[in-house]
Amino acid sequence: MLSITPSEIVEYLFCPRFIYFMNCIAVPQSEQRRLKVLIGREIHKKKEYINKDYLRKKIGCIDKELSVYLSSEKVKLRGIVDEVLHLKDGTLAPLDYKFTVYKDFVYRTHRIQNILYGLLIEENYGKPVNKGFVVYVRSKNYLKEVEHREKDKYRALNIIEDIFNVIINGFFPKKTKFPARCIDCCYKNICVK
Ligand code: SF4
C-alpha cells in the first residue's frame, strides 16, 4: 500500500520542495536526517505529556484510546494518533499534543494534521468525526477545538494528492511563501527559482 505519514505532510506544509528533494533528487542522507530531526523532535517529545488516565468529560469524552496506529488505503495515510476520543454523541475525535505555545490561532499544519487523523479514524472505525482537539503543552496544556468541516477534509485530501504528484510524477513544486525558511535550509544551494 502506498501511503505517507503525518511527518511527511508537516514537511510538505513547511515547504513543498522538501518532499521533492528528499524523494526525487539524491541529497546527502546526513542533511536529510538533520532536517527530519528538526521537524520530528516534537513528535517524540510529546509522548511524555500524554495523560493516560484523564478523561476530558467537559468536552463530552466517555472513553479514549492512546497512541493508536491507523492506516488507510483510501486516504493513503498511516500514522499514530495520540488519543482517539469517544464522545457521548456517538462521534469520535482525534486529540493531538503539540510541544508549542498557543498563539491565538491553530497553525495550518496542526489543523490539517488533525483533520487527516480524523479521516483515518472515520475510515478505520466507521464512525463520524466532526471535530478534533489540539493540546498546547507549553501553554499549560491549553485545549483547542478544531472543526472538521467537509470542505476542510476535501482540502486535506488534496494536499495528499499533491504530495503523491511530487513523489510519483516528480512534479517540482513551488517554493515556500516564507523566505525566512530558506536561510537555514540544507537545500538552499540547489533550490532554484
Ligand atoms: S531553500 Fe527554501 S524553497 Fe528551497 S527547499 Fe529550502 S525552504 Fe524550501
Image (cartoon, rainbow, N blue to C red):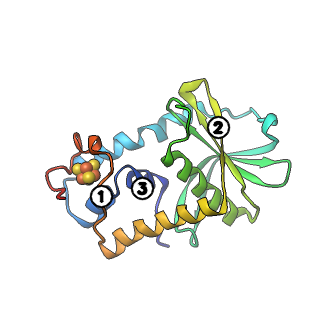
Image quarter of the C terminus: bottom left
In the image, what residue occupies the spot 57% across and 25% down? 139
Residue 123 vertical position relative to residue 112 in the rendered view, above or below: below
Closer to the camera: disc 3 or disc 1?
1
130 sits to left or right of 177: right
Disc 2: which residue: 144
Q: Position of residue 188 (x, y in %)?
A: 18, 49
In the image, what residue occupies the spot 20% across and 62% down? 26
Residue 17 has which mark? 1
Label located before the other in sequence (3 or 1): 3
Disc 3: which residue: 8
Residue 42 vertical position relative to residue 141 in the rendered view, above or below: below
Check mark 1 vs ligand 1: CB closer than 8 Å? yes or no. yes
Tag 3, which secondary structure? helix
Tag 1, which secondary structure? helix
In space, the residues marked 3 and 2 are separated at their CA atoms by 23 Å
